[in-house]
Amino acid sequence: MEEKFNRLIFIPIAAVLFLMIGYQYVCPADSNTCYFRSDEKGLFQRYSAGLELVYTEPEADEDLPSKITSRFNFTERDLDRRVDFNIRGDDVMVFLHIQKTGGTTFGRHLVKNIQLEQPCDCLAGQRKCTCHRPGKAESWLFSRFSTGWSCGLHADWTELTSCVPVVMNKRDKKNTPNGKRNFYYITMLRDPVSRYLSEWKHVQRGATWKTALHMCDGRPPTQDELPACYSGEDWTGVPLPDFMNCPSNLANNRQVRMLADLSLVGCYNMSSMSELERGRVLLASAKSNLRNMAFFGLTEFQRKTQYLFERTFGLRFIRPFTQINSTRAASVGISEKVRWRIEGLNALDMELYEYAKELFLRRYQYNRQRQHQEERLRRRQERQQRQRLHRTYLAELWRLGIGGGGAEEVEEEEVEVKVLEEVATTEDYGSQVVRW
């Protein structure tokens, strides 16, 4: 009689547990299957090491076009950028900082906003931070805010590729052959017209960058090869027409020049080939170097830049990037005629930016698709795990209800404990799933 009563009590308990298992199967903790709509905004959330990293829905001006106009043929290799960055080993991240592309902000993100086992040590009042590898007095980052201008002020691709390996070996007191060490180059680009106007405003306030070395093939340019645009200490107060009228102004097509291999065109010697041929070679070189860099971002797409950097290097930022559109360049009102003139002076940069923008958006699109595929695979694996646990649970119920008529009471209690443990395992597993 007592055994029959125990069975009657167990049936509703088993039914409740069955419903809980069914709910876990139909509405897993990480899915939106049973999600009730709210006003919250966001694609996914990630919680890591007690810090909340939130990837919000891109801002209105960052929305991905429903269809990206295709002008260039990019391969999957061009789009798939995943770097196994070994911060404990000898790998070095090299930031090529082009003037007025938001590089100062991005550079600060690198030293102050990345989750690291050993964060960069940034002391108040000092321009540079110490970014050492875990347990080593060696730098993993080559940038303005970590190593300073060790290869010259705003060193370009030509300067960095020949200088960085030597400087880093000297700093770390190593003699590592170039082929044994990975240097991952990264940079930021900006809309050419906005960047040009921003540089003009900066020069108008007194900036010169005249201490830049412009090294190429082992020597700086001569005065004849790179004549100054102004006499005196600086170009303070320069009107925009005067700024545009200087033929040797390095603001013209700056992004192409700083990303190209200048040794291909005789460095700053303009007489080595025609202007048309020189432009063609420089543009092709800049496109190739940009495409083969580990990463590049666009100033106009801050959140996407953050997303792609994190996907590329497997690192996470602590705080989300902020899109700031109220810049000095945005406050400059120019006529259509002046805009056309600026676009003409920066024709190579305009072509490069179109190329970079399409590549950037395609990489973003490719990575989002890969991320969704990874999520679907993870959910499928979790669903299979839940199904296995569910089958085990049903088998135990079947055994308890049909095959246990003459079993000892102790055996029945062991079965019940085993079933409850299975349920607890399912709930515990669901709670450990990383939520996106």
Image (cartoon, grey):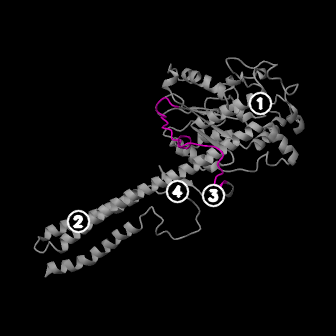
> Residue 45 bears which disc, if any?
4
Q: Position of residue 3 (x, y in %)?
A: 15, 78
Q: Nearer the viewer, residue 99 or 64?
A: 64
Label 4, label 3: how far apart the Cα atoms are: 23 Å
Residue under the point 78% across and 37% down: 346
Label 3, on which residue? 66
Residue type for callout 1 = Leu
The residue range painted magenta reads 62-91
> Residue 276 bears which disc, if any?
1
Q: Please say whether residue 14 is one of the residues in the magenta stretch.
A: no
From the viewer's perspective, is the residue at label 1 or at label 4 nearer? Answer: 1
From the viewer's perspective, is the residue at label 4 or at label 3 nearer? Answer: 3
Label 2, on which residue? 417
Q: Residue 51, can we see it?
A: no
Please tell me in which quadrant of the rendered image residue 22 appears: bottom left
Q: Position of residue 53 (x, y in %)?
A: 54, 52
Mark positioned earlier in the residue sequence (4 or 3): 4
Tell me: 258 left or right of 414.
Answer: right
Residue under the point 85% across and 41% down: 341
Q: Please say whether residue 76 is one of the residues in the magenta stretch.
A: yes
The image shows residue 382, relative to residue 220, as above or below, that is below
Residue type for callout 3 = Ser
Circle 4 packing at 10 Å, graded few (<14), some (14-19), many (20+), is: some
Mark positioned earlier in the residue sequence (1 or 3): 3
> Residue 14 bears which disc, if any?
none
Mark positioned earlier in the residue sequence (1 or 4): 4
Q: Secondary structure at mark 3?
A: loop
Residue type for callout 4 = Gln
Label 2, label 1: how far apart the Cα atoms are: 81 Å
